[in-house]
Amino acid sequence: MNAVTETVAAEPVSGVEIFVPLAKLKKSPRNARKVPHGEAAIEALAASIQHKGLIQNLVVEPETKEDGTPTGNYLVTAGEGRRLAMLLRVKRKQIKKSDPVRCWLDTANDPSEISLDENVTRTPMHPADQFERFQELSENKGWGAEEIGARFGVSASVVKQRLRLGAVSPKLLQVYREDGLTLDQLMAFAITEDHDRQEQVFEGLHHNREPWIIRRDMTAANVPADDRRAVFVGADAYVEAGGNIIRDLFSEDRGGFFENAGLLDMLTAEKLRDIAGEVQAEGWKWTEAHIDYPHAHGMRRFYSQSVPLSDEDEARLEALSAEYDALAEGYSSYDEMPEDTAAKLEAVSDEIDTLSAKRSAYDANVIAHGGAFIVLHHDGSVRVERGFVRLEDEALADPQPKPEAGDDATAPEIGEDGKPEDGDEDVQDADEDEEPGKPISDSLTRDLSAHRTLALRVALAEQPDTALIALTHTLTAQLFYSYAEAGCLEVRPTVTPLGSHADGIEDTPLAARASEQHEAWAERMPRDVADLWGFIVGLTDEKRTALLAHCAARTVNALRLPWDRKPRSLQTADRLAGALALDVAKDWTPTVDSYLGRVTKAHIVEAVTEGVSEDAARRIADMKKPDMAQAAEQLLSGTGWLPAVLRTPEPAGTDLARVEPEDADSVEQPPEVEDSEASFAVAAE
């Protein structure tokens, strides 16, 4: 067939291959495609033409004036996308507008029909075939993602996705071709290139084949990159040690999955032991490294004490603080600062922290005979817990005088009547002589102290401010010093450990907050409990109230135990939650482990109905229990739904925490008290 290079108007001869300068090609008004090609499609065509030339001719017809005279230009009946792609290449100075373009001249057929036929009468390649061809180009020609992307006008990340899909088990690709899997499901299998694992998971799937379930099963034995161990060790150190990280190219994987959990645990333990060695170099007798905090250690803990800074350090700290403020002025974050300013500010901040750390220190005896635990925090940071002393070293670490054993051993037992149970209380009086300066008898001492105790009770009740100090002192002495005898109020705080009631609760962010609050107070306490009263008196009213609140908070017990029925206590706990406007949803979410996997299917459906919708609950109602629990976890995420046990009840009436104070005589007694008094009156009659 003849090919002609057209520089002038061609005769209307149909069925001829001609070469027309690009500048003389125009869009046909009879092109059937009204929605224009997207930018990505034009980019891909331009890349293809650049690397492989024009594979398919453009179909054209001569442009004519109203009287039928040719204008010298040609209308593109089929191939408008290719024309636009070549114009893009002109814009990029890869070709010139005068360059010839191979075209097929067709004046015999209806241009609109030709345009429609080109876009309709064709079968797109199945995606699986495309994935495999990309994989072949990579394996057979050695092309990387960048090279393949350049030749097909797509990004390297898209090429990597197609290569990963092309590397899926041929068995699963065939299932995908036969519509047995969706593209989303196939992408979930592509999270790893292990064909055996892919086929194993596929065989284990039930009717529920959600992509997230496939991903979960594919990575069941792996550790997500946001796990605290992975964050602590770091991806680089793990890979350097021979570990492999699985990447999900089709969803946000937050850094992938660490394939070798055993290697990760070993690296975590080794790094913790290295840090433990650094801490022991501070002078501690011992240190222990643990991934999880050893809650059952049973040791007494001593805290650091306040230490005044030297005049030189105080002056330096003041100068650094002024410098920090000057550098930070006008900026809200490090990102907004010039690099040199940010670096200088960070250095100043580090020096401030170093000097501030000198404000507290452990007693030399505690360091010499005590130790520290080095554990992994919930967020992957290192948690160093210092000041623990083993039982055999307590006497050496704590120089405070202790009561002699004989003091308690010879104390007489007191009976219900407040008198000694063994012998006549006046025997000692009869044996006493009348020497000047002789101590008074024990019986008289007891007598007089009873009168003083009664006077203290009355006086304390009349002075609420002092009562607040005394109560705070008594609770603090026992919660921070373990000295029940240090206070004169017979109030005994009980702190119930929660670890035996909920696995892992003591390693949660909320537990870390509670621990940090306690340690912040502990570091401010005087070393000797004898100085505690003066410490509490010296606090501002606000700080003293905060300390009392902390001590009271440590004793809260709202546990619901089958063997310990306490409806009135739980009712009070509900009222306390209401007064605090407690919202447990800020720190707890329903997961398979925390709730959904431990209740019946009916409970799961109820939860989804309440937290999401009835339609969502119906969609999962026929699933098997494990699949239902997993699906419910996804549905309830971020909804704030809570089971009834965790909800804060709506107040039935007036909020008791906000009742205005009034005369005690005007407060009505609860109905149950009135009823009981009425019953007593009837019985007396």
Image (spheres, rainbow, N blue to C red):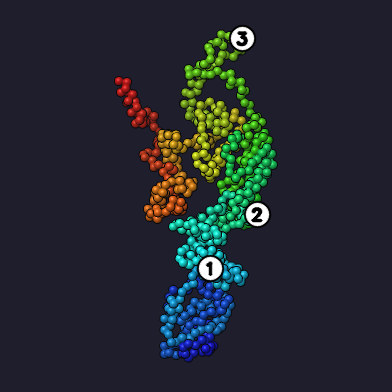
Q: Are marks 2 and 1 in contact (CB under 8 Å)?
A: no
Residue at disc 2, secondary structure: loop
How far apart are the two marked residues, 2 and 3, measured between alpha carbons?
A: 85 Å
Q: Image point 53% across, 31% down: which residue?
A: 475
Residue at disc 3, secondary structure: loop
Q: Amino acid at mark 2?
A: Ala
Q: Image point 52% across, 34% down: which residue?
A: 495
Q: Amino acid at mark 3?
A: Glu
Q: Please provide percent x and percent y for residue 283.
A: 69, 39
The answer to whether residue 684 of the structure is visible from this angle is yes
From this view, report whether residue 285 is shown above or below residue 408.
Answer: below
From this view, report whether residue 194 is shown above or below residue 25.
Answer: above
Q: Image point 51% across, 32% down: which residue?
A: 494
Tell me the mark number nearer the camera, choosing from 2 and 3.
2
Q: Which residue is mark 3?
A: 435
How far apart are the two marked residues, 2 and 1, measured between alpha carbons?
A: 33 Å
From this view, report whether residue 384 is shown above or below residue 137.
Answer: above
Tell me the mark number nearer the camera, choosing from 1 and 3.
1
Q: Image point 51% across, 82% down: which residue?
A: 57
Q: Which residue is mark 2?
A: 241
